[in-house]
Amino acid sequence: MGKKTIGIRFAGFGGQGIIRSGIIVGRAVSIYDNKFATMNQSFGPEARGGACSSELVISDSKVLYPYVTVSDVLVVMSQEGYDKFEPELSEEGMLLIDEDLVKPKPPRGKIKIFSIPATKLAEELGNRIVANVVMLGFFTSLTKVVSVEAMRKAIPESVPSRFVELNLKAFDCGYEYSRKQKC
Amino acid sequence: MKANPKDVFSGTYYIDGDVACAYGAAAAGCKFLAGYPITPSTEAAEAFAKLAPQIGAMFIQMEDELGSIVAVLGASWAGKKSMTITSGPGFSLMMEGIGFGAALETPFVIINIQRGGPSTGVPTRTGQADMMQARWGSHGDYEIIALSPDSPQESFEFTIKAFNLAERYRVPVMLMSDECVGHMTEKVVIPSASEIEVEPRRFYHGPKDQYLPFKPERDLVPPMVKAGEGYRLHLTGLVHDENGYPLLDCDIDEVTQKSTTRRLVDKIRANADKIIEIKEDSLDDAEVVVVSYGITSRVALKGIEQAREYGIKVGSLRLVTVWPFPEKRITELAHKIKGFVVPEINYGQIVFEVERCSHGKANVVLVPHGGAGVHNPDDIFEAIKQVAKNKEKYEGVVEYRTSLERLIFG
C-alpha cells in the first residue's frame, strides 16, 4: 500500500480481542517499525459484548487526524461488525473476514475480500481466544503495513506471559494460511 | 532538581493519554491521589493506583468529588505533591474546593479529561467546553494555571509541567485534556530521571516561631511548611492576613486588600510572562493565524496544511498554557494580520479572549464544534480561506458555519 496515511479498522464483538488487535499492530508499527500509529477504540457496553471496534491510523509522519473516516483495511470477525463498518471501507480497500462468522455481500468497487477460518484454526491450536492473533498473522502477510519482525516483538508484550507461545503460534498459523491457505 | 529515579518508569510504551498522565504524575513526584471514578478519566486513576505501591504513593477512592478535592488539599498541606483526576460533572462538583485551594495557596493538580456536552453530556466522547470554567468556575477573585495536551506523549510531559507550576506558584494547576487525547493510544517515551526536571516544594527554612504562612517572597509566593511539624498554622477560606487569621471587618483596608486577594491574582499575572508557553509556526508573514489548543491544535494542522497548499499565508499559534492567556502576543499579531481563526470543541470560549485581545484590529472567526467528536479539517481550511479572502472588517466574533452545522440546521 503506497498511501501516506492508512486507516485500519478491526471489528467484531466484545471479548474477541478486537481492541487488543489494534494495540498489538499499533505497538508494532510505532515502536518497532518506527512509524506513527494512533489507536482508538469503542467504549461502553459495545466494548463488553456488542459490536466492538478499534481503529488505527498509520502514517510516516505524526498522525494529525486521529480517527478513521474511510478505512483502507477492514478486519471483521462478526456479522454485526461487517454490517456496521462495511460502508466505511474504501472502494479500493481490503476486507479480511473470519469466513465462519461473516457472510459478505458481493464486493463494491475494487474491494478485495480475503477469508480465513480464524476461530476454527485457533480452536485447532487449542484455544479460540487466539483467533484475533491468527487473524493478525493473516493481516500482516496480506497488507504489509507492518513487518513480521515488529509483530513478533509486539505480541509477547501485549498478552499474558503464559500465553506468549500460543499467541506466536497463532500468529504464524494465520501468516502461513495466507500463503498455503492452510496451517 | 531532577526526578527521583524510583518515580520514573523509563521506557517506550504504547499507552493512552490517561495512562500517560499517571506516569507523568509519578515522575513529577506525586504521592497522593484522591478521586472518584468518572468516564473518560478513570483509566488515569486506575493506572496511578497500580503505580502507587511502587512509588510509595497513596490512592484513595473518596465518597465523591467534594471529598476528593478536599482530601487533595489536606495531603498537600501535609507536604505531599497531590492531585485529583476527573471529568466535567466531577469538575463542577470540585469548584468550591478549587477556590478554597486557591485561597489557601495550596499547590495541587487537577486533571480534567473533558467530555462532550453540558451536565452528564457524552461521557465517552470528547469536548473542550470546560475552558472558561477552569478559569472562573469558583467564586471570587483568584487566578489559576491551565495546560492543554494534544497527545499521550504531551499528557505525560504536561502533567509534570503542571506539578512544577503548582509547586512554583503555590496554585491549583489544571491539565485540561479531553476524551480524544485521554483515550487515544500512541507511543510514549518516558526518559530517564536525569532528564526530567521537577520543582521541589518551596519549604520555609527560618526560625519556627517566626513563620508566617502567607508572607510572600519577592515573587509574591509564600513558602510552605508541613502541617503537624510544630509550626503554628491557621488555614481558613476567609480572607486572611500573613498569619492566616481571618481579617475582621475593621481590618480590611487598602493595605490588607493588597496583601490578600490582590496578591492571589498578581502572583500569576505578574509572573505571566514566565508561565505562558505557546508554540508558534510560520507567523512572520502570516495573513491568517489559527489559534488553537489541545486535540484541536493537532486536527487544525491538517486544515493549515491544506490552506498552505492552496497558497494562503497561514500561521499557527498553539496555546500550551491556556491560562494565563497570551494577551500581549495576540494583540501584537492582531495589528499585523487579516484575521484569526479559532477552532474549538465548544460554541465559543477562548475565541472571545482572542477577540478581546484583538482590540478590533483583526477579524476573529470561530469554528465551533458541539462535542462528541473533533473538527473536520476541511472546515478549518474553509474558514481560513474565508478570512484570507475577506476585505471587510467585522465587529465581534464571526461564527463559521461548519459542514456539520449546515447538515443539521440547513
Image (cartoon, coloured by chain):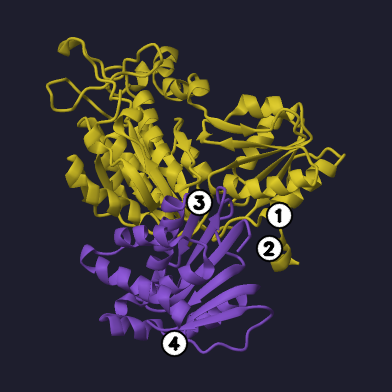
Q: Which of label 4 and label 1 is nearer to you?
A: 4
User: Tag 2: residue type?
Assistant: Leu
| Residue at 30% in and 43% down | B69
Residue B105 in sight: no
The answer to whether the residue labelled 4 contacts the one labelled 1, judged by CB atoms less than 8 Å apart, is: no
Please tell me the numbered disc located at residue A101.
4
Chain B, colour shown: yellow
User: Tag 3: residue type?
Assistant: Lys
Q: Which residue is mark 2?
A: B404
Disc 4 element: loop
Q: Residues within 10 Å of mark 2 (few under 14, many from 20)?
A: some
User: Tag 4: residue type?
Assistant: Leu
Q: Residues within 10 Å of mark 3 (few under 14, many from 20)?
A: some
Q: Which of the image's four quarters has the N terminus of chain A?
A: bottom right
Please tell me the numbered disc located at residue B379.
1
Please tell me the numbered disc located at residue A35.
3
Same subunit: marks 2 and 3:
no
The answer to whether the residue labelled 2 contacts the one labelled 4, judged by CB atoms less than 8 Å apart, is: no
Q: Residue furthest right?
A: B391
